Image (cartoon, grey):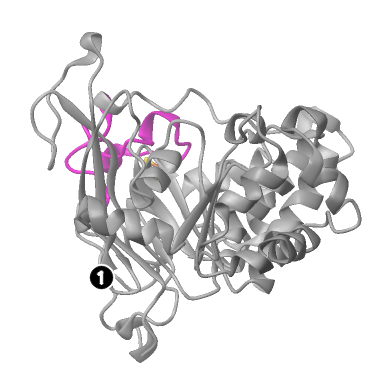
Amino acid sequence: MTPPLLLVEDLRVALPAPRSAAAPSRGASGGNAREVVRGVSFRIPERGFHALAGESGCGKSVTAMAIARLPPADAPGRVSGTVLFRGENLLALSPRRLRSFRREGGLACVFQDPMDALHPALTVATQLREAVPESVPRAGRDAFVRSILADVGLGESADAVMRSHPCELSGGMAQRVCIAMALAQKPALLVADEPTTALDVLVQRKVLRTLKDAASTRGAAVLLITHNLAIVGEYAETMSVLYAGRVVEDGPVREVLRTPAHPYVEALLRALPRLDSTRGVEDLAVIPGRVPPPENWGADGCTFAPRCPRAADVCRAGREPGLMPFGGADPVPGAPCRTAGRGPEAAAGTAPVRRVACFRSRVAER
Ligand code: SF4
């Protein structure tokens, strides 16, 4: 059995509640904290490409920050669960080991806005050289940096880019520089949090293709955070869809997007613009309402029920539906995820298992 590069199990993050919403949290956090990530689990193999998808406010970025050990500076949260990176629990690293883990470049991040990520007063060359690990000999650092700039599509203009300050670059070039800086650290995992949201739609596609190809060339796995299922379908291999801080469906991208099992995933897909549509924006379905605030998550039955066209009485009472293997499992409200009985590969955890958290989809399937 090949162990995964990253194994996230029952990850929970509790942040202090705002004064106006200081309801006590259920779960591990306690006190006046409220859980904004609630038991998230997924795995990424070496060189894999996994996407975390969902609307804004569902906990995608907080999940990524918790994995990268980057808690928000103004609201330090409590994190529990397990984040195994090549067998080492990142949540249990001492500050000293965390510094060396970062120096070794196990994990690197690409953030949403490249202009926020780059230092405005330093040239690109200075910033790229600082990202290169000490294992690269000093004499070979410029050549190493140029090779990475070539990987991200800036090889022909490498000299001009390296002399530039960030304000002299276009948004797409600046994000490519950020991807190059992340790859310069020789990471095994690249965490990309909505890396194209701040870019023109025409540039988005090129930057994502660059990110996927460059990560593949350098042997890095990718964890992509995005609200856009079209992007997931084009670039990712496996995916998890988050709603209200929980995974509501996950599995291989092809399976999930071709036959979505959870009504939330169905609704997200219906809301995607289609090039073959003849009716323009009138064809676009809208998900009614909005993601409820965290203090209301899990209060009564399924948190998606107020927005769900398939909601029934069973959905609104008792505990939230638990994440269960899709196919053959008992639809027991609140039951934990189970992978036993799904074949040797699934039981061993080496094959991505399709799972869904919805009473009705599991009942309808049987
Ligand atoms: S459990 Fe019920 S309300 Fe929740 S997603 Fe499924 S059908 Fe909709």
| Above or below for 191 versus 166 | below
- Residue 222 position, x and y percent, is 55, 61
Q: Where in the image, quadrant-wise, is ligand 1 located?
A: top left
Depth check: give the residue in front, 48 or 131.
131
> Which secondary structure lies at badge 1?
loop
Q: Is residue 331 magenta?
A: no
| Relative vertical location of residue 90 with respect to residue 254 in this rendering, above or below | above
Relative placement, left or right, of 335 versus 172 is left
The image shows residue 268 at horizontal and vertical percentages of 58, 42
Image: magenta residue range: 296-321
Between residue 40 and residue 74, name the one nearer to us: 74
Decide: few, some or many residues near mark 1? Use Cα within 10 Å; few <14, some 14-19, many ≥20: some
Locate residue 232, reporting x and y percent: 63, 55
Instruction: Give the residue at x 64% y 50%.
Output: 128
Taking the magenta stretch, the answer to whether it contains residue 317 is yes
Q: Name the residue rendered at 55%, 66% in the picture.
A: 186
Q: Name which residue lies at 21% across and 60% down.
A: 336
Most extreme residue toward the left, as rendered?
Answer: 31
Q: Three-letter amino acid code at disc 1?
A: Arg
Residue under label 1, please give it.
338
Taking depth in this image into account, of 77 and 12 the one nearest to the observer is 77
Query: Can you say which quadrant of the picture contains the C terminus?
Result: bottom left
- Which quarter of the rendered picture does the N terminus lie within? bottom left
Residue at (13% x, 35% y) in the render: 26
Q: How many marks?
A: 1
Residue 134 seen by the camera: yes
